[in-house]
Image (cartoon, helix red, strand yellow):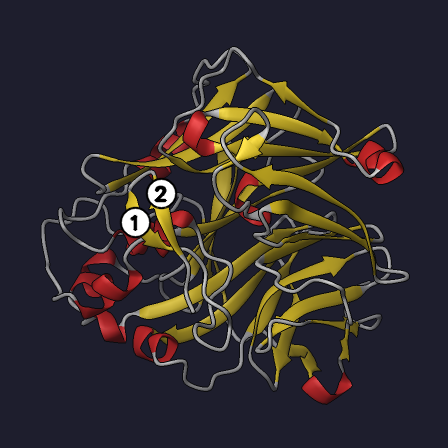
Amino acid sequence: MAATLLSEYGIYIKRFTFNINPMKHITKLTLLSLTAAFCSCTETGTVDKEYMALENVKYINDIPTSYTLKAAEGKVLNLPIVHIEDFAISDSLFIASTGKDDGLIDILNLKDQTVRCSILRKGNARYEFMYSIGITLEVSLMHRDDTLYAYICNSPIGKLYKVNINKCLESSHTDITEVFEECKLPRDAFWTRMLNDTLLVTRSLEDMQTAQIRKLMNAKGDVVPSPVMDTLNRFKIPAKENFNIMSTLIAVSPDSPVCVEAPLGMNYINVYNPLESTGYTLCIGKKMDKLSDILRTERKDRRYMFADARSYHFGFAVLVFDIDEMTFQMNKKFTPSILLFDWQGNSLGKIDSDFKFNNFDIDERNRNLYVLNEDNLPVVFHLDSVLK
């Protein structure tokens, strides 16, 4: 059954198990009132900006399939975790959001598939969290001097914490400290990620939920100017429209402060550096989806394009559903795919599948791809011929 809880915007559907709802990795912005939005009538309004995009647009057509994931060929991992909400791979570690009251995040060793430690608790005390933690929403993993750190945002109270993962593994206790103490993070932010050791990016809904505002902030809480983000912030939807239109999945490069934004319901991806005010839009197809066309489409027929975005040293990857809302809401059969790109926006190939899955991550070192199947179990595929 679905769990519910209070978010900054009211009550929202938290996360479903996959056999009820195929979308596991979606933003808090998207999770709010999905069912109500699906059933609501379509409203059209004045459109000032048709595209949530940048000036430089590249078009990608007919990406050839490099590999097809076959359910029968994947290896199901027998991990000792009852429930996985979200996960990330870092070297030989499988870092999973579990939703458990005691141990919101489990860290496992992929070599022997054992839990090395469970960290963080639900609660209202210092260093505790009111809700479960989304790995791809609120956690930034960074390597510094052979040490892995996790920066974790506690949005409801506007705090940012740093966890020394190496020390957690050594002692089986959470090594956590508060950072950016002078910075008052927006409490209505539904996504916060570190760009580097001194800058972070937040996103929140403003103007009666008609605009999605990105902010670049430093350790003192000052907003750092970013014209490229200002360009994206100018995209607005009509009042009372479904704000899922603006929802995006975001990943940040491990090597530079470059962001990748993949909208849930549009066929293009924005790649930009907030510090240099440069970037481009990558359109998957011959023409970009227009806001006015979306507004004229019944919500059950609207596109559900991207479902996950991840970044790597070689580039980035996006999970493609490319179905309509009816297919998603009714949990009908469909097979997703993964598109791979380098940081210049050149296609590196397409990974198709013969089964339904959600959430994915790539172990670059060992060239393994991990996905969560319909039974919410992690499955690994070795893609030596694809991930070079």
Q: In the rendered structure, which amino acid carries the disc numbered 1? A: Ile
Q: Which residue is mark 2?
A: 7
Q: Position of residue 183 (x, y in %)?
A: 49, 15
* Residue drawn at x 46%, y 18% as measured from the top left: 224
Q: Quick one: label 1, few (<14), some, or many (20+) residues within 10 Å?
A: few
What secondary structure is marked by label 2?
A: strand
* Residue drawn at x 18%, y 59% as measured from the top left: 292
* Residue drawn at x 42%, y 51% as measured from the top left: 248
Quadrant of the drawing holding the N terminus? bottom left
Residue 343, placed above or below residue 70: above
* Residue drawn at x 55%, y 80% as measured from the top left: 356
Relative to 26, 302 lies left or right: left
The front one of 219 and 364 is 219
- CA gap, disc 1 and disc 2: 6 Å
Numbered mark located on residue 11 in the image: 1
Q: Position of residue 373 (x, y in %)?
A: 61, 75
Q: Position of residue 329 (x, y in %)?
A: 34, 75
Residue 24, placed above or below residue 179: below
Q: Quick one: label 2, few (<14), some, or many (20+) residues within 10 Å?
A: many
User: Dots 1 and 2: beta carbons under 8 Å?
Assistant: yes
* Residue 300 can be seen in this image: yes
Relative to 221, 71 lies left or right: right
Relative to 264, 38 lies left or right: left
The front one of 312 and 126 is 126
* Quarter residue 296 falls in: bottom left
Q: In the rendered structure, which amino acid carries the disc numbered 2? A: Ser
